[in-house]
Image: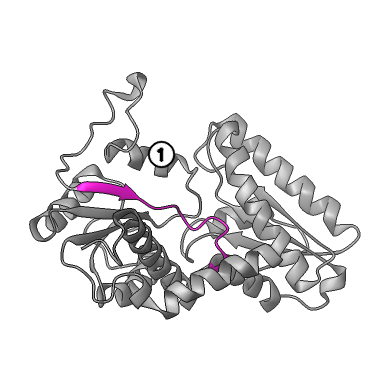
Amino acid sequence: MRKFLIYLCALSLVILCPSLASGAPDKKLGILILARGVDPPGVPVSGWDQHIIDAVEPIKQEYDVELVLGLEPEKIQEGINKLQSRYNDKILIIPFYISTHSPVVRKLEYYLGIEPVPAERAAEIKPLDIKAEIHMAHATEHDPLIAEVVYERAMEISRNPANETVILVAHGPTTKESETLWLKSMYALASYVKERGDFEDATVGTIMFGASPEVMKQANEDLRKLVEERGRDSDVLVVPCLMAPGGIEDMLADVLKGQKIRYGRPYLPHVNITKWLKATIDAKLVLWGRESKIPYPY
């Protein structure tokens, strides 16, 4: 936990002392926040989308921000075009996702030209038209601010930590290679929650939604087996590592139907998510300042 606290203190300095980063925001920097929207065109904004919008709103008061809800390349291009029309120098991309190793984030990297499009996907994915200098941040991962959110979600449903096992459950990737990297970050969150809350244990699982039927079926069976095994000797708390309510909680409930467990809430709403967004921006500004050997980029 000491490493988490040290890292959290370092980020807190950036959050509490924005003058270390950029002072007033510079008009040559644009922020593009990309999130998975759940609303089809023409329908009222759902709770999921509204939570994302609310978390981003304070950031708009300090930086020039475009929020894109959805994966359609046309929407992403529109956001880029708007930023380029006002800030034709640098654009910081923030993937508003749980893991950088998500297949969705990888696809975004292809669209943005950050990673070359594999030959086998060339017909499916065409890089967008981008003139500005692009930089991409990490997803939430096991950032200390996020670790605190997950810990709080576990404590909200805890009654006797010494006799409870916390299972963090995420959407999960679609391949075993991505799963290894994704779970590494989740295990770091689980370790923090266990130590901070004095729980009997904390571990992780995924439901692999979007993977092949065989892979998803196996992941679901593994998760049910994990819950059953841990439930024999302790109470099981399931905390979904999901960005906001209104997504795939029902699917998770179906997978674990009949199990004796208590469910926690997704990340939003929580002030730390907005703090994470701001810290991510400010940390990048500090880095650019060091690279330029001046207090901030411009």
Q: Position of residue 223 (x, y in %)?
A: 71, 47
**Residue in the foreground of this view, choosing between 289 and 36:** 289
Q: Position of residue 207 (x, y in %)?
A: 61, 46
User: For residue 119, what is the image quadrant?
Assistant: top left
For this orientation, the residue located farthest to the front is 293
Q: Is residue 277 above or below residue 169?
A: below
Mark 1 residue type: Arg
Q: Position of residue 137 (x, y in %)?
A: 39, 53
User: For residue 219, what is the image quadrant?
Assistant: top right
**Residue in the foreground of this view, choosing between 11 and 295:** 295
Q: Is residue 291 left or right of residue 133?
A: right
Binning the other alpha carbons within 10 Å of mark 1 as few (below 14), some (14 to 19) or many (20 upward) gives: some
For this orientation, the residue located farthest to the left is 85
Please give the name of the residue rendered at 34% of the width and 77% of the height, measured from the top-left corner: 19
In the picture of the structure, the residue carrying the numbered disc 1 is 106
What's drawn in magenta, residue-wise?
133-145
Q: Is residue 167 left or right of residue 235?
A: left
